[in-house]
Amino acid sequence: MTLVAGLRAASYGIPFQPVAGVHGSELVRVNNWKTMRDPYGSGRDVYVIPAVQPDVAVIHAAEIDVEGNARVYGSPFWDHPLTRAAKRVLVTAERLVPTDRMREQPELTLVPGFMVEAAAIVRGGAWPGSMHPYYEVDYPAVERYMNDAAGVLAQHLAEAPEATHSAAVAS
């Protein structure tokens, strides 16, 4: 929640965002987060997380149209505040859909096209994570990647959808 709080602060154009739940955490010391007294009189102190404004946000969406309107089905927990906080937004997506489809249910559009600087269709781009409704988390791939052994990264990259797609295109 602290990263989301920092992203929200940037997206709201404010220098910090209050957040609960970090009292007693080492993150407070490591990040040198400050507290402020509740201005509404409870007498409690609350931590305030500084704004986090990335230069570029790259998200993977389920669908995008030619105008850059992007949809993420399922939880857009990080994606929404990230795309609002960043100076530039790039989107990869599972598939290109007609703009008319986007217009049928505009409320499902997570990132409007005017915010998107560039986009690309990258099938399997969330792998080994999930992209609802197209595929679930590939837990065996995650477990293989977590092994502390020589060659694990190279093997992981060789299994990635873009590597297997590139090989198929080249042959």
Image (tube, helix red, strand yellow):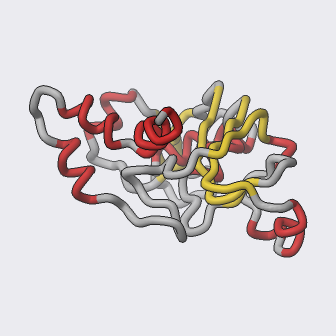
Q: Is residue 157 left or right of residue 86?
A: left
Q: Is residue 170 above or below residue 21?
A: above
Which residue is at the front of the view, 82 or 147?
Answer: 147
Residue 8 in view here: no
Compare residues 149 and 82 and report the one nearer the observer: 149
Residue at screen point 56% across, 40% down: 6
Residue 30 position within the rendered picture, expressed as x and y whole percent measured from the top left: 31, 28
Of all residues shown, which one is farthest toward the front? 171
Q: Position of residue 149 (x, y in %)?
A: 9, 31
Position of residue 150 measured from the top left corner of the image (x, y, whole percent): 12, 26
- Do we see residue 145 in this rendering? yes
For the point 90% across and 67% down, which residue is it? 100
Name the residue furthest left: 149
- 61 to the left or right of 139: right
Q: Is residue 149 above or below residue 124?
A: above
Residue drawn at the location 46% of the way across and 36% of the way down: 171
Seen from the viewer's position, the closer of residues 156 and 36 is: 156
Q: In this figure, what is the number of numbered marks?
A: 0
Residue 79 point in image, percent of width and height: 60, 50
The residue at the point 39 percent across, 27 percent down is 32
Compared with residue 64, is residue 170 higher up or lower down, i.e. above or below? above
Left or right for 56, reference 160: right
